[in-house]
Image (spheres, rainbow, N blue to C red):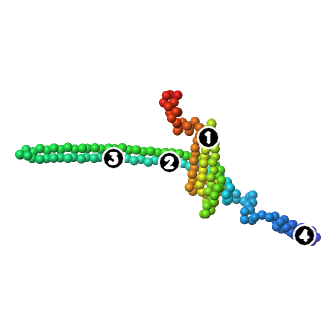
Amino acid sequence: MSNSLSLIMRMMVYCLIFISTAVSSIEYDIGSYKASWADQRAAAIGDVVTVLIQETAKASSSAGLDADNQHSVGISNQINSRSFQLETGLNGSMAGESSTSRNGSISATITARVVEIDQHGMLKISGEQYVTVNGEEQKITISGYVRPEDLSAQNLVISSRLESANIELSGIGEVNDNRNPNIFRLLFRWLGF
């Protein structure tokens, strides 16, 4: 029994010596080392970040105007026991209301690249994505700053957590052309073509 225990102890010592020798012979920079199972959040220029865009914008305003004006001028005089009066007046009123409202929303997922790290450690990200649906090309562009602590363990950030966010959705195609028609398209519409 003691021989088998002694043999197990020797094997463990040999294994420890072998492991320590193998680890010391591997050269790596401990400051930048990241294990494959470790947190994979973006931390350097060139890293990518997935942005979940969930934006809804609603704005409305209204204004009312009520104005009443009344002016009158009168003259009265008495000459040779005759009196006369002259009165004139001007009345005016105006009332009006105006209102405007605008709604917009965008929902998308886009991957952006870290292009800069500012002096406060915030990551500046920038990215664009093209999507073509029924021959219509849409371009989604995003840029802004994100704090490293706002990134989830899956390297995701919600667009509402971006500072100085610039999110743009633009389209190229028939729908966009009809929304902003040129002079020829307006002329053909007017002629009924």
Q: Residue at x 58, y 45 (%)?
A: 169
Q: Which residue is labeled 3 in the image?
A: 66
- Cβ–Cβ below 8 Å for labels 1 and 4? no
Q: Position of residue 33 (x, y in %)?
A: 74, 62
Mark 1 and mark 2 lie on one chain; the one further toward the N terminus is: 2
Where 177 falls versus 16 (above or below)? above
Quadrant of the rendered image containing residue 42? bottom right
Residue 61 appears in the rendering: yes
Q: Which residue is labeled 1 in the image?
A: 137
Q: Which mark is residue 10?
A: 4
**Alpha-carbon distance for marks 2 and 3?**
27 Å
Kind of residue indicated by mark 1:
Glu
The single residue placed furthest to the top in the displayed view is 192
**Alpha-carbon distance for marks 1 and 2?**
25 Å
Kind of residue indicated by mark 3:
Asp
At label 4, counting other C-alpha atoms closer than 10 Å, the crowd grade (few under 14, some 14-19, many 20 or more) is few
Question: Which one is nearer the viewer's eye here, 112 or 118?
Answer: 118
Mark 3 and mark 1 lie on one chain; the one further toward the N terminus is: 3
Residue 150 appears in the rendering: no
Q: Residue at x 70, y 57 (%)?
A: 40
Mark 1 and mark 4 lie on one chain; the one further toward the N terminus is: 4
**Alpha-carbon distance for marks 4 and 2?**
74 Å
Q: Residue at x 59, y 40 (%)?
A: 172
Kind of residue indicated by mark 4:
Arg
Mark 2 and mark 3 lie on one chain; the one further toward the N terminus is: 2
